[in-house]
Amino acid sequence: MSLPQNAVVWTELPVTDLDRSRAFYGAVLKDELTIEEGAPNPIWNLPCADPKTAVAGHIYEGKPAPKETGPTVHLAVSGGLDDAMERVRANGGDVVSGVITIPAGRFFFGHDPDGNSIGFFES
C-alpha cells in the first residue's frame, strides 16, 4: 500500500453570497477565481497551478458552520502577511490572531465574511 502525496485532496468552502466571497478571496489571495458551471451548482475555483496534481478547492453557495465551530482551511497568500491582514480586513473579513511561526512557515488565522475559519499561510 502506498501513501498518497497529500491526505487532503480537495476543499469546499460554503458561502452565503458567491459574488461577495469571490471578491473577498480574489482580493485577499491576489488572484482571480474561475467559475465552473458544469457542476450541479455554480462554483468558483480557488487559484491553483494545476488542480490535477495539487490540493485545490472552491467556494459554493451553501450554509457555513457557525463561527468558531467549523474546520480551518489554510490558503497561500502572497505579498507578505501584514499586507494580507489588511486585505482581509478591507474586504469584510476578520483577523483573529497575530502571525504564528511553525516549522512549516508563517501564517495567521482569520475569518472570511461568512465566518469560515481560514489560515492565511505565507507562500
Image (cartoon, helix red, strand yellow):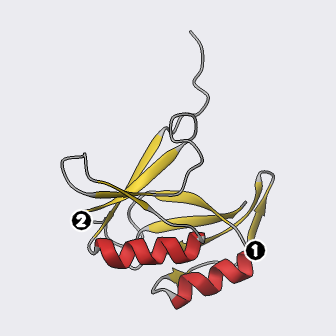
Residue carrying label 2? 63
* Residue type highlighted by circle 1: Gly
Residue drawn at (48%, 82%), measured in percent from left and top? 93
Horizontally, residue 95 falls left or right of residue 39, namely: right
x and y, in percent, of residue 16 in the image? 26, 72
Crowd around label 2: few <14 · some 14–19 · many ≥20 (10 Å): few
Q: CA distance from mark 1 to mark 2?
A: 31 Å
Judged from the image, the secondary structure of the residue bearing numbered disc 2 is loop
Instruction: Confirm or deny contact between disc 1 and disc 2 (CB under 8 A).
Output: no
Query: Which label was assigned to residue 39?
Result: none
Residue 117 on image: x %, y %: 47, 67
* Residue 101 placement, left or right of 61: right
**What residue sits 41% from the left and 68% below the top?**
116
Quadrant (top left/top right/bottom left/bottom right) for the C terminus: bottom right
Q: Earlier in the sequence, mark 1 or mark 2?
A: 2
Measuring 73% from the left and 74% from the top, which residue is drawn there? 79
Taking the view exactly as shown, the residue that stands out farthest to the bottom is: 90
> In what element is the residue under mark 1?
loop
Q: Which quadrant of the figure has residue 105?
A: bottom right
State whether residue 115 appears in this view. no
Question: Is 103 above or below relative to 96?
Answer: above
Q: Nearer the viewer, residue 3 or 37?
A: 37
**Numbered label attached to residue 80:** 1
What type is the residue that disc 2 sits on? Lys
Residue 29 sits in quarter = bottom right
- 100 above or below 48? below
